[in-house]
Amino acid sequence: MVDTMENDKELDEIEEMILEEGKKNHSKISLLCPVCNSSNVTYYLGGQIGYMYHCKDCGYIGALVIET
Ligand SMILES: [Zn+2]
């Protein structure tokens, strides 16, 4: 019984590690401007339309960005 409980705990820790790794991978995604390929793109709140993006280099504002 004790062994079974320890195994369950290890599985939980592995799942937590996988979740943490997923968060890291997600944060590595960078946004590229579709017009000038600049990575100097920030989120731009579009009100009713939803989230859009703003390229600081060429001034592009739109919903389309390239995720790498
Ligand atoms: Zn741009």
Image (tube, rainbow, N blue to C red):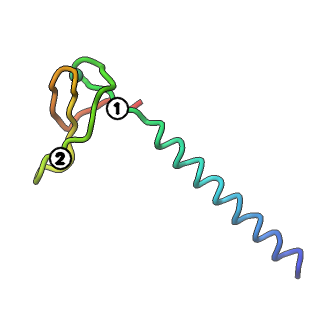
Q: Are marks 1 and 2 in contact (CB under 8 Å)?
A: no
Q: Quadrant of ligand 1?
A: top left
Which quadrant is the N terminus positioned in?
A: bottom right
Q: Is residue 42 left or right of residue 68?
A: left
Q: 46 above or below 14?
A: above
The residue that appears at 54% across and 44% down in the rendered structure is 24
Question: Would you say the beta carbon of the disc 2 residue lies within 8 angstroms of ligand 1?
Answer: no
Residue located beneath label 1 in the image: 31
**Counting other residues with Cα less than 10 Å from the Cα at mark 2, is it few (<14), some (14-19), or many (20 or more)?**
few
Which quadrant is the C terminus positioned in?
A: top left
Label 1 vs label 2: CA separation?
15 Å
**Counting other residues with Cα less than 10 Å from the Cα at mark 1, is it few (<14), some (14-19), or many (20 or more)?**
many
Question: Would you say the beta carbon of the disc 1 residue lies within 8 angstroms of ligand 1?
Answer: no
Q: What kind of residue is marked 2?
A: Leu
Q: 60 above or below 24?
A: above
Residue 56 spot, x, y in % from top left: 21, 26
Q: Is residue 24 left or right of residue 65?
A: right
Residue 28 spot, x, y in % from top left: 48, 36
Q: What kind of residue is marked 1?
A: Leu
Q: Residue furthest bottom?
A: 1
The residue that appears at 25% across and 24% down in the rendered structure is 34
Q: Is residue 12 left or right of residue 58?
A: right
Residue 52 spot, x, y in % from top left: 20, 41
The residue that appears at 21% across and 47% down in the rendered structure is 51
Which mark sits nearer the N-terminus, 1 or 2?
Answer: 1
Q: Quadrant of residue 13?
A: bottom right
Viewer-proximal residue among 15 and 58:
58
Residue located beneath label 2 in the image: 45
Q: 12 above or below 67?
A: below
Secondary element type, mark 1: strand
The residue that appears at 14% across and 46% down in the rendered structure is 46
